[in-house]
Each structure stands twice: as C-alpha cells, then as structure tokens.
Image (cartoon, rainbow, N blue to C red):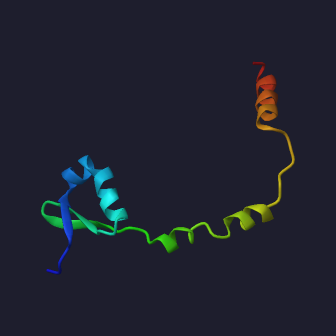
Amino acid sequence: MPELGLTFPVRVAKAKLSALLELVASGQDVVITSDGEPKARLVGIKQRERGKVFRGMGDYLMSQPVHVGPTADEVIREDRDARGW
C-alpha cells in the first residue's frame, strides 16, 4: 500500500475538521479512513489555482441581459390581491 501521509478516522476528522483544514492549508495532505480503509483525501488548493474558478465570472455576469419588469414585491402584491388577501 502506498504511503498515505497523515491519516485520521472519520470520527476524529469530524471532531477536528477545523484543525485538519489548517493542516491542509499548510501543505499537508490528510487521508480520512472509515473502518480502517482510506475513503477520502483532503488536499489544499494551491494559491495560484484559487482564482481560476471564478476568473471571467464578472465579464459573464455583465454580459447577461438585465430583466426589466415588476419587482418581487409587486408580483407578490398582485398575487395576493388576486386571491383577496
């Protein structure tokens, strides 16, 4: 079996999740086991990869048409008036 690094049972991982996230953020990989078997690996996100997920999202959102119509309050009021509330 290959070296797993830091390994914790799921019960410990649940109780100490914040501490495990700090370990992961510092560069350690953490393996979570259940019944002695590896089930998951927590791996940190490299600093340069963090921005990739939403890169370009602002441009995309700005390119979307703006819906001009009644506000949510107006729609609710109209619905309630129609029901006699």
> Is residue 80 depicted above or below 23 in this figure?
above
Give me the residue at 26% from left, 65% from top. 30
Q: Position of 42 compared to 35: left or right?
A: right
Give me the residue at 20% from left, 72% from top. 5
Residue 63 location in percent, x, y? 79, 65
Residue 59 location in percent, x, y? 74, 67
Residue 7 location in percent, x, y? 19, 64
In the displayed orientation, state which residue is furthest to the front.
26
Q: Position of 47 compared to 3: left or right?
A: right
Placement of the N terminus among the 4 image quadrants: bottom left
Give me the residue at 34% from left, 57% from top. 21
Q: Dividing the picture into quarters, in which one does residue 45 lie?
A: bottom left
Q: Dividing the picture into quarters, in which one does residue 64 lie?
A: bottom right
Q: Position of 60 compared to 20: left or right?
A: right
Q: Dividing the picture into quarters, in which one does residue 22 lie?
A: bottom left
Residue 29 location in percent, x, y? 29, 69
In the displayed orientation, state which residue is furthest to the top.
85
In the displayed orientation, state which residue is furthest to the right.
68
